[in-house]
Image (cartoon, coloured by chain):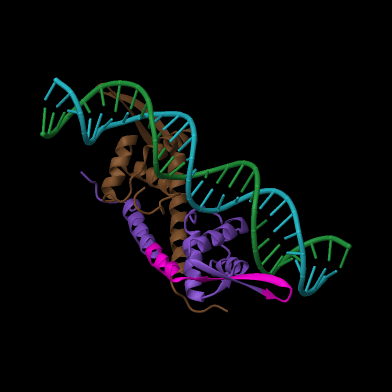
Chain colours: A purple, B brown, C cyan, D green
Amino acid sequence: MGTNNLYKGNLTTIVLKLLEEKGRMYGYQITQEVKAISVGELVITEGALYPMLHKLEAQGLLTVETEMVGNRMRKYYSITHDGKKEVVTRMEELEAFIRQMQNLLNPRIELA
Amino acid sequence: MGTNNLYKGNLTTIVLKLLEEKGRMYGYQITQEVKAISVGELVITEGALYPMLHKLEAQGLLTVETEMVGNRMRKYYSITHDGKKEVVTRMEELEAFIRQMQNLLNPRIELA
DNA sequence: CAAACATACATAAATTTCTTATGTAGTGGA
DNA sequence: TCCACTACATAAGAAATTTATGTATGTTTG
């Protein structure tokens, strides 16, 4: 997960958002895309990704289609309507979080 | 920890930064101050706070002075030189994290 | 004046989320 | 033929936190 562990709790948000944008991706592709976009900073491990995808599917936020490409299996994931609602919620939470962190961490006027 | 769980992994940073600003605080005071600054959004639980303070002391990032106020014990924590270095590192990491999240989550031009 | 709430510390068990390690299997190049 | 890459998967362990308790004093309120 790169050099620092602040992404903890945000991997799901990143994956859902990516699937919302791209429409349809398979697991390995997600890891490569995230690595590319983050310029190598964020590497999602398989041990984190696959259980997460299964969980999101079980929750109805993603759907799967299995395809054979040549001789190899691929499981394509797409975001559902519920998944899109979840993305909206998570984005709002993230923005609130960033505001709060700036509020908490920027030196401020002495409070009573 | 409030309504969303994004603060996960940042509680230590928040506490160290607060002690750097304020100079000297005790546990309960930290929970109240954080709650006040965040307007009730961020509530640090005791089960998270006290073990964390003990750990930071063991790591040499904080020092403790126990005082009796009336009939009641208070343990005042202060940040050390090493603690201040840690704050600098953590602030840089947080800024890098926020930039990466904006990069990952803002709709962007289609990549190759 | 008793009960409820606030102050102030603390720890233990459970939960969530992740890393590390391992396994299977096909592909492709040096 | 070995190594790296693609592509899936699971299990054991680690870290940070929540939830649940526990102890004890202080203060407000009906």
B82 or A43: nearer the viewer: A43
Residue A83 coordinates in the image, percent (x, y): 45, 67
Q: How many marks?
A: 0
Q: Is residue A35 left or right of residue A94?
A: right
Query: Where, by quadrant of the figure, is residue B46 drawn?
Result: top left
For the question of whether residue A6 can be seen, the reply is yes
A70 or D4: nearer the viewer: A70
Q: Quadrant of the N terminus of chain A?
A: bottom right
A99 or A17: nearer the viewer: A17
Residue B1 coordinates in the image, percent (x, y): 36, 47
For the question of whether residue B26 can be seen, the reply is no
Q: Quadrant of the C terminus of chain A?
A: top left
Residue A105, relative to residue B110: is it above or below?
Answer: above
Q: Is residue C12 left or right of residue D12?
A: left
Residue B17 coordinates in the image, percent (x, y): 37, 46
Name the residue located 34 percent from the left edge and 56 percent from the top edge. Answer: A102
Residue C27, relative to residue D15: is it above or below?
Answer: below
Name the residue located 41 percent from the left edge and 65 percent from the top edge. Answer: A86
Q: Is residue B72 left or right of residue B50?
A: left
A67 or A95: nearer the viewer: A67
Q: Is residue B28 left or right of residue B91?
A: left
Report the span colored magenta: A68-90
Residue B107 coordinates in the image, percent (x, y): 44, 74
Q: Let me know if residue A88 is in the magenta part.
A: yes
Name the residue located 39 percent from the left edge and 65 percent from the top edge. Answer: A91
Name the residue located 33 percent from the left edge and 49 percent from the top edge. Answer: B42
Q: Let me know if residue A101 is in the magenta part.
A: no
Residue C7, relative to residue A54: is it above or below?
Answer: above
Residue A40, relative to residue B37: is it above or below?
Answer: below
